[in-house]
Image (cartoon, rainbow, N blue to C red):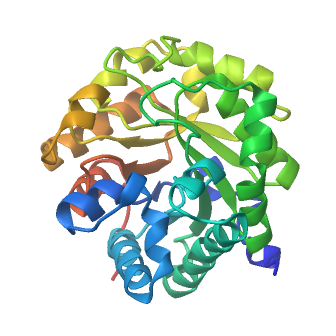
Amino acid sequence: MAHATHAKHRNALPQLGETRLLTDGGLETTLIFLDGMELPCFASFDLLRTAKGKAHLEAYYRRYAELAAEKGVGFVLDSPTWRASSDWGKKLGYSADALDAINREAIQMLLALRERFEAPGRPHVVSGNIGPRGDGYSPDFLMTEREARDYHTTQIRAFAEEGADMVTAMTMTHTGEAAGVASASAQAGLPVAISFTVETDGRLPTGQELGEAIAETDALSLKVPTYYMINCAHPDHFRDAVSRGEDWTKRIRGVRANASRMSHAELDNAEELDDGNPLEFGREHGELLALLPNLRVFGGCCGTDDRHVNAIADNCCHHRKAA
């Protein structure tokens, strides 16, 4: 069952050095708005139930892996498991065993993609994606560190046993859950990136400032998270928050921003995809590099696709193109 020997980069993540890596764009919004897929509860992992769905996911990841190869850089393969924790699984009719199996299958799919696309100088990191227990936009369900650790442990253990290199917790809305994910990852022996979402004022949905949230998560966790990210917000929403040169900004090594400048409430009610301006989006990420000295992982969130990630790469990954 366990394939931890496949955890090629677990003990030396390339993004902790000078290596810059791309990752994918907005998986769920791409599947729903661009590909016309049905995703109950925004759960992309549900596609793994069928051969057709799995093939669609593989094609999605291939598109980005090929883009990274074209740009001559490595890639973070983030699993489609943002909704694959127990509360969401129950809503979708999954038993505990079936959910565990699908989390493992997601990692196995990414390991196979790494075998195909990784090359010297272009490391491919396999990351198990953890989402919030509640709504990714709203802090309506607050947990303590211990409650969150207990809740997320099963999914994280599956990632570790199948050979993931790391965990990435996306759209964390509050510090208790972020710290619980960090603690569960530490107990499983996995490095972890904690990615907070922020509102249009650059603060967490709880109203807490980003720097304070990072300090509090560090303090609450059994082991300090490996690094932090920001996702599911437009660069305009958090640029001011990271622009003062405060020490905590050095902890941020990844950004997966939204294409749209709309608030979370507006996005929640949107019936059409707002894909913004990909070229402008890329330039804005180039500007973020001057503010976030350790930024290494570049991808997108809601409304972004390979056009946006291509523009980000042109502005942030100073590379040699593959021959």
Residue 4 placement, left or right of 43: right
Residue 181 placement, left or right of 128: right
Q: How many marks?
A: 0
Q: Note whether 19 is above or below 261 in the view shown.
A: below
Residue 316 placement, left or right of 219: left
Q: Note whether 133 is above or below 12 in the view shown.
A: above
Residue 131 placement, left or right of 218: left
When asked about the image quadrant of residue 110, the answer is bottom right
* Residue appearing at x 59%, y 40% in the figure: 133
Q: Is residue 294 visible?
A: no
- Quarter of the image for the C terminus: give it: bottom left
Query: Residue 247's x, y, as percent?
Result: 60, 18
Pick the front one: 320 or 109: 109
Q: Note whether 125 is above or below 179 in the view shown.
A: below
* Residue appearing at x 53%, y 28% in the figure: 173
Pick the front one: 159 or 119: 159
* Residue appearing at x 62%, y 77% in the figure: 105
Q: Is residue 233 visible?
A: yes
Query: Residue 19's x, y, as percent?
Result: 55, 55
Q: Note whether 129 is above or below 94 in the view shown.
A: above
Pick the front one: 289 or 126: 126
